[in-house]
Image (tube, coloured by chain):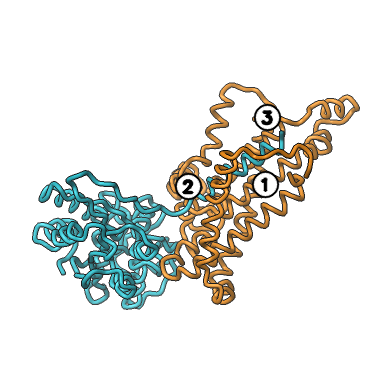
């Protein structure tokens, strides 16, 4: 009786443990008879902009429907390499796109569709009075960065190196949204993220500019994948992103043009 | 062997086989894909060892904390009738079904620098839990303790209370009864609960990364290291996952046999 109960709890426990980590990609929907669904794997920093583009695509061509799987570029690249059902990949950096080019997963050659720069993100009102990268070294200040494994973390290290600022962050977050949310919640005093993420962070955060000579320009490549189940629909989505209406949407979210 | 052996009805056999395969296939996938040649260099890499050590320290601390805090709770659930007991029990077992990331956010609201209790801790004692090893332990305890509480409560409920009554009539005090009669009688479920709690804490990911962040040697436990390694070194990620699996499997199999008797 007692033992049997324990083993039931054990099974429940193992299932719960197995379910816990990491978000999984959204499965592709079957799609209607008419609509052509495009599954877009896009970098986390594109979240708001691509949702808006998805809406605009649907208005331009009602039969085209875009669905998004948003995560760190390297996570997405790994998912695609493991056979995730993606039609289009939009990366926040070149190395992760190159990984897929090298493994022969990309149709044609990738095209740069946007650029982004870095900013210091602080809670609204800038309570700690941060004016530049050098301030981040101040003792007692809680600074969070992206992990070096993801693009925003790599860029942040480059920026700090250029400014000659060495610091140990309190945390190396798995993606850029996690850095913004730690700052927005007041757990961290500052972070280094993309300009667009500060903009997307709303009224709870504000950005402190990093001068051009210390900053880096992140280029975002996009490509149709060879595994695309509807190559023409996927190409139509990419064409829209590169078209003037698509570029206007991206500019509205703070992205630079290629 | 022998006694009461009957043929298993075919549909049950097929479904049970499918269910076993459902759990075993992913393991086989990991084992087949593992780059065994890199086993030793990957496992002994400084970041792997750091994560492994932190994982052991944090999960064992979380289990100890769960025992200290969870035992009294289980005892009250099993022995005391009070209004709202069902609701309270549901509230304290919520972390079992809550998405762990949500648990992490909730922990920030309570114990974060601006949290309900967190800002008091910060102002009065200068204690900040996020981004610390203590914070990782707290996150693991939050997610894992319900497993211990529920298992021990079940043990206490199914125990024969006449032994306690007998001890009491023979002149034993309440503390002696608890120490010499109750705890030894529920030892199997106590142990099973602690093991489950430990296993869950060892595998904890979402609440830890949300509440405690991720920094090697401080809050980067093995599951976090696996997740980030998946981004740059997928081979190392597979090997680290296997380490986690082997450790958990050995503990579940060996301890179950030793303490609960093989079924």
Tag 3, which chain?
A: B
* Distance (Cα) linking label 3 and label 2: 27 Å
Query: Is label 3 in contact with label 2 (beta carbons under 8 Å)?
Result: no
- State the residue position of label 2: B100
Q: Residue beneath label 3, please?
A: B78
- Residue B194, which numbered label? 1
Same chain check for tags 1 and 3: yes
Where is residue A258 shown, x and y percent of the image? 16, 69
Locate residue B258 relative to residue B107 in the image: left or right. right
Q: Residue furthest right?
A: B170
Toward which corner of the image does residue B148 lie, by quadrant?
A: top right
Task: Residue B164: give x, y in percent of width and height.
Answer: 82, 29
Counting other residues with Cα less than 10 Å from the Cα at mark 1, is it few (<14), some (14-19), or many (20 or more)?
A: many
The residue located at (37%, 75%) in the rendering is A165
| Secondary structure found at label 2 | helix
The tint of chain B in the picture is orange
Tell me which residue sits at (54%, 67%) in the image: B239
Instruction: Label the cyan chain with its letter.
Output: A
State which quarter of the image contains the N terminus of chain B: top right
Q: Is residue B225 above or below residue B20?
A: below
> Which label's residue is closer to the chain start, 2 or 1?
2
- Of residues B215 and A169, the one nearer the viewer is B215
Front one among A118 and A84: A84
Element type at mark 3: helix
């Amino acid at each position: 009786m007692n033992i049997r109960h324990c083993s039931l709890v054990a099974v429940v426990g193992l299932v719960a443990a197995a379910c816990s980590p990491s978000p999984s990609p959204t499965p592709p929907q079957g799609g209607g008879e008419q609509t052509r669904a495009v599954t877009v794997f896009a970098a986390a920093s594109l979240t708001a902009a691509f949702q808006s583009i998805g809406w605009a695509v649907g208005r331009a061509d009602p039969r085209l429907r875009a669905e998004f799987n948003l995560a760190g570029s390297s996570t997405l690249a790994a998912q695609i390499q493991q056979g995730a059902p993606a039609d289009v990949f939009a990366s926040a950096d070149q190395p992760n796109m190159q990984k897929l080019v090298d493994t022969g997963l990309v149709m044609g050659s990738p095209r740069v569709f946007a650029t982004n720069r870095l900013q210091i993100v602080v809670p609204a009102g800038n309570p700690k009075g941060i004016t530049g990268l050098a301030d981040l070294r101040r003792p007692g200040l809680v600074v969070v960065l992206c992990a070096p494994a993801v693009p925003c973390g790599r860029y942040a290290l480059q920026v700090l190196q250029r400014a000659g600022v060495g610091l140990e962050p309190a945390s190396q977050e798995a993606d850029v949204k996690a850095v913004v949310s730690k700052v927005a919640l007041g757990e961290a005093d500052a972070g280094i993220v993309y300009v667009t993420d500060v903009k997307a962070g709303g009224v709870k955060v504000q950005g402190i500019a990093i001068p051009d000579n210390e900053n880096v320009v992140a280029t975002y490549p996009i490509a149709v994948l060879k595994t695309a189940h509807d190559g023409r629909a996927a190409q139509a989505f990419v064409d829209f992103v590169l078209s003037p209406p698509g570029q206007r949407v991206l500019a509205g979210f703070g992205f630079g043009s290629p | 062997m022998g006694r009461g052996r009957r043929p298993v009805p075919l549909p049950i056999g097929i479904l049970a086989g499918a269910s076993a395969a459902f759990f075993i296939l992913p393991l086989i996938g990991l084992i087949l894909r593992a780059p065994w040649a890199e086993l030793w260099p990957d496992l002994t890499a400084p970041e792997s060892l750091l994560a492994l050590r932190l994982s052991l320290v944090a999960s064992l601390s979380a289990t100890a904390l769960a025992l200290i805090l969870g035992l009294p709770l289980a005892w009250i659930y099993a022995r005391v009738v009070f209004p709202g007991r069902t609701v309270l029990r549901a509230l304290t077992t919520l972390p079992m079904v809550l998405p762990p990331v949500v648990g992490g956010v909730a922990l920030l609201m309570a114990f974060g620098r601006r949290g309900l209790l967190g800002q008091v801790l910060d102002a009065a004692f200068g204690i900040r839990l996020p981004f610390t090893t203590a914070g990782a332990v707290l996150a693991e305890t939050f997610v894992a303790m319900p497993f211990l509480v529920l298992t021990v409560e079940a043990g206490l409920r199914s125990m024969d209370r006449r032994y306690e009554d007998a001890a009491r009539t023979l002149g034993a005090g309440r503390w002696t009864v608890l120490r010499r009669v109750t705890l030894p009688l529920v030892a199997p479920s106590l142990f099973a609960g602690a093991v489950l709690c430990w296993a869950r804490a060892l595998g904890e990911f979402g609440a830890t990364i949300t509440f405690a962040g991720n920094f090697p040697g401080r809050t980067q436990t093995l599951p976090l290291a696996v997740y980030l390694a998946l981004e740059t070194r997928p081979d190392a990620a597979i090997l680290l996952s296997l380490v986690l699996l082997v450790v958990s499997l050995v503990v579940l199999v060996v301890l179950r046999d030793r303490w609960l008797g093989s079924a």
